[in-house]
């Protein structure tokens, strides 16, 4: 009884680790998005302040000009400070007054009077954090005569709030998923005590895929919120983003897309999605998978070797996913060079082989390579080949790693021709 319970805890523990990983990914995406947002604000302030300071060199500052600058850049405040710490012009307040030290950092003013631009956190208004930039304004002789102060906060507060809501939404959903997982696991383990060993093994595999699907459902919503927020931030910032900022946002979106694909794989592993069965021209599916692999791995060439093939019955999209997965695994193992894709009729079936000259599959994982969460790659998830086997078997076929002595790996897929397909 104790041995049965300990065996059952393995897949449940992996599903729990998946939820923990989703929470960690949500936090990492939030931090990356926040960093990109702050970098964008910094670049925006520096660009606006530097340009405005140059314009003020030739003409004295006035409340009207400062107000126009404030509106054009969606700022919260724009004013000028002279060497006597007086405010000769202010877009939102009275002029000819002493500087408000609760709003203005004397060190920032001093640095700007010395010719240095400074941008950083300023004061807070409730939950709104205002970022302040100090820019030297030079006279016609080149000497610094005053300081242009820009304040920004509200323009980015909605994006900050959206990111924060996405974070807490992801945390809440992960917590709910963990609680639901714990309740389902407890009930499942209680039921397992009354069953035979063979039934327990079958139920364990079924529970694992269901838990994975549950985790995927819980992860998809916060991922959508994060993606939408980052895309909105990129759209609103537009050309004002620096190249580094754009790359940071693309990195965030890339990680969101990677996690989205992971959740789709988890849902496919649950085997509750129907196949769109139809007669499929397998040669077209193979060609599309080969082109997708060459596009994703520019240093790899897929050498095709297949002529006229009999049609198979199945879901073209899922079959394309199978062969793209196998080809891209081969391309990753190969690094660069050539991988081989061959297909031919084999009696009442079609046989497809994918070969590479990479390092091969480690002997310790060969027997379990198609099991869920088993991988021969250092950064693998253990989902790709398990999903390939599940999809191929649902099409009435088989997939295997061909035992060979040569360097590299060969995977073989056999699918029944349309007249024999189930």
Image: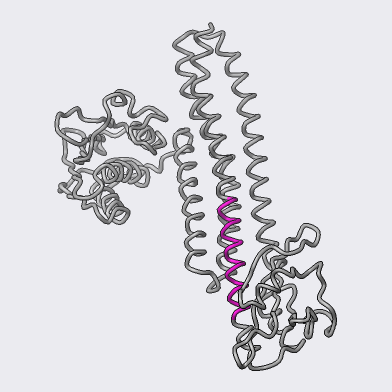
Q: Residue 358's spot in the image, x, y percent? A: 22, 40
Does the magenta run of residues contain 168? no
Q: Nearer the viewer, residue 175 or 306?
A: 175
Q: Residue 368's spot in the image, x, y percent? A: 33, 24
**Position of 189 compared to 100: left or right?**
left
Q: Residue 82's spot in the image, x, y percent? A: 74, 82
Q: For the point 64% across and 54% down, which residue is it?
A: 163
Q: For the point 33% across and 32% down, which residue is it?
A: 376
Q: For the point 67% across and 65% down, which residue is it?
A: 156
Q: For the point 75% across and 80% down, which residue is it?
A: 81
Q: Main secondary structure of the magenta part?
A: helix
Quadrant of the image occupied by residue 198: top left
Q: Residue 11's spot in the image, x, y percent? A: 49, 24
Establish if 228 lies above or below 10: below
**Position of 6 compared to 114: left or right?**
left
**Position of 54 compared to 357: left or right?**
right
Q: Nearer the viewer, residue 179 or 335?
A: 335
Establish if 186 lies above or below 393: above
- Magenta segment range? 30-50
Does the magenta run of residues contain 49? yes
| Quadrant of the frame with the C terminus | top left
């Amino acid at each position: 009884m104790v041995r049965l319970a300990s065996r059952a805890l393995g897949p449940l523990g992996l599903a729990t680790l998946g939820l923990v990983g989703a929470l960690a990914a949500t936090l990492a995406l939030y931090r990356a998005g926040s960093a990109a947002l702050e970098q964008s604000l910094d670049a925006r302030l520096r660009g606006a302040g530097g340009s405005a300071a140059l314009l003020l060199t030739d003409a004295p500052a006035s409340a009207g000009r400062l107000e126009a600058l404030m509106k054009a850049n969606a700022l919260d405040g724009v004013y000028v400070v002279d060497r006597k710490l007086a405010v000769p012009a202010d877009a939102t307040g009275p002029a000819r007054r002493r500087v408000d030290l609760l709003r203005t950092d004397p060190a920032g003013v001093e640095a700007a009077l010395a010719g240095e631009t400074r941008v950083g956190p300023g004061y807070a208004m409730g939950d709104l954090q205002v970022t302040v930039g100090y820019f030297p304004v030079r006279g016609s002789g080149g000497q610094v005569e005053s300081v242009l102060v820009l304040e920004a906060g509200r323009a980015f507060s909605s994006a900050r709030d959206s990111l924060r809501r996405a974070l807490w939404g992801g945390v809440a959903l992960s917590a709910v998923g963990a609680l639901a997982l714990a309740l389902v696991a407890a009930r499942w383990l209680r039921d397992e005590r009354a069953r035979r060993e063979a039934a327990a093994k079958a139920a364990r595999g079924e529970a694992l895929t269901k838990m994975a699907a549950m985790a995927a459902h819980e992860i998809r919503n916060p991922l959508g919120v994060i993606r939408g927020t980052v895309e909105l931030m990129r759209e609103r910032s537009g050309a004002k983003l620096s190249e580094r900022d754009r790359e940071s946002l693309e990195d965030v979106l890339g990680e969101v897309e990677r996690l989205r694909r992971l959740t789709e794989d988890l849902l496919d592993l649950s085997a509750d999605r129907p196949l769109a069965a139809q007669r499929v021209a397998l040669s077209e599916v193979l060609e599309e998978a080969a082109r997708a692999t060459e596009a994703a791995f520019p240093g790899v060439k897929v050498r095709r070797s297949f002529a006229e093939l009999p049609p198979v019955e199945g879901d073209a999209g899922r079959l394309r996913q199978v062969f793209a997965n196998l080809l891209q695994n081969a391309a990753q193992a190969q690094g660069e060079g050539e991988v081989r894709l061959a297909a031919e009729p084999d009696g009442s079936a079609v046989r497809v082989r994918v070969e590479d000259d990479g390092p091969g599959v480690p002997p310790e994982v060969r027997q379990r390579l198609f099991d869920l969460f088993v991988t021969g790659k250092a950064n693998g998830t253990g989902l790709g080949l398990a999903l390939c086997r599940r999809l191929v078997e649902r099409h009435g076929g088989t997939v295997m790693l061909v035992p060979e002595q040569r360097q590299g790996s060969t995977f073989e897929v056999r699918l029944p021709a349309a007249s024999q397909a189930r």
